[in-house]
Image: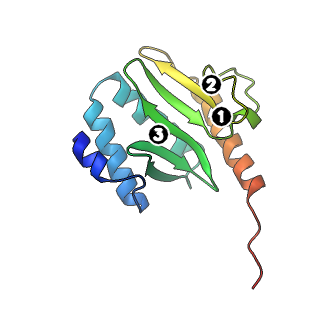
């Protein structure tokens, strides 16, 4: 997928199928270790939460949601960054968070070329983020 096509998609692409196609395109577009890493992260997220919803927001950022944002998958020259929307509220016994540690809400994991992902710990962190989102879900209003 070309960058121009991604920009045309706008701030938020509607529909999970469209967002998934845009994420597929980003992975192909990168065509290097970053694309492979983003694809692996995506696979692990889906394994941890089969009900996850993929979104495409903020002019080209893959976002995974379940009762709210779980995390994003940003790609930069030297890192693939997973930013957990409520990461500061999550237990991280394996010490995966290594970026954005000073904030009050978010936490991130920067993955560099050649680094091995602790898949078991990452899936546990994703599940914890889903549980946190579900616990904060507002009850439906009565008619």
- How far across and down, in percent of the image, does residue 62 sit? 44, 43
Q: Is residue 140 above or below residue 137?
A: below
Task: Give the residue drawn at x 43%, y 14%.
Answer: 114
Q: Foreground: 113 or 79?
A: 79
- Image coordinates of residue 53 in percent, x first then y, are 51, 54
| Marks 3 and 2 close (CB-CB < 8 Å) | no
Determine if residue 1 is in view: no
Residue behind mark 1? 106
- The residue that label 3 is drawn on is 42
Q: Which quadrant is home to the N terminus?
A: top left
Dot 3 surroundings within 10 Å: few (below 14), some, or many (20 or more)? some
Query: Which image quarter: residue 48?
Result: top right
Q: Secondary structure at mark 1?
A: loop
Q: Is residue 89 in view from this perspective? A: yes
Q: Is residue 108 left or right of residue 10?
A: right
User: The residue tagged with tag 3: helix, strand or loop?
Assistant: helix
Across and down, in percent, residue 97 comes to: 64, 24
Q: Earlier in the sequence, mark 3 or mark 2?
A: 3
**Residue count near mark 2 (Cα–Cα under 10 Å), binned few <14, some 14–19, many ≥20:** some
Cβ atoms under marks 1 and 2 closer than 8 Å: yes
User: How far apart, in angstroms, are the residues tagged by discs 1 and 3?
Assistant: 19 Å
């Amino acid at each position: 997928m070309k960058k121009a096509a991604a920009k045309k998609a706008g701030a938020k692409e509607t529909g999970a199928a469209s967002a998934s196609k845009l994420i597929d395109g980003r992975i192909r577009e990168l065509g290097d270790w970053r694309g492979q890493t983003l694809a692996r992260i995506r696979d692990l997220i889906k394994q941890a939460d089969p009900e996850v919803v993929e979104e495409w927001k903020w002019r080209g950022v893959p976002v995974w949601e379940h009762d709210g944002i779980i995390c994003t998958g940003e790609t930069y020259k030297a890192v693939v960054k997973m930013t957990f929307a409520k990461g500061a509220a999550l237990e991280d016994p394996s010490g995966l968070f290594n970026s954005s540690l000073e904030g009050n809400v978010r936490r991130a994991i920067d993955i560099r070329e050649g680094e091995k992902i602790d898949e078991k710990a990452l899936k546990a962190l994703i599940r914890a983020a889903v549980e946190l989102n579900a616990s904060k879900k507002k009850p439906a209003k009565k008619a």
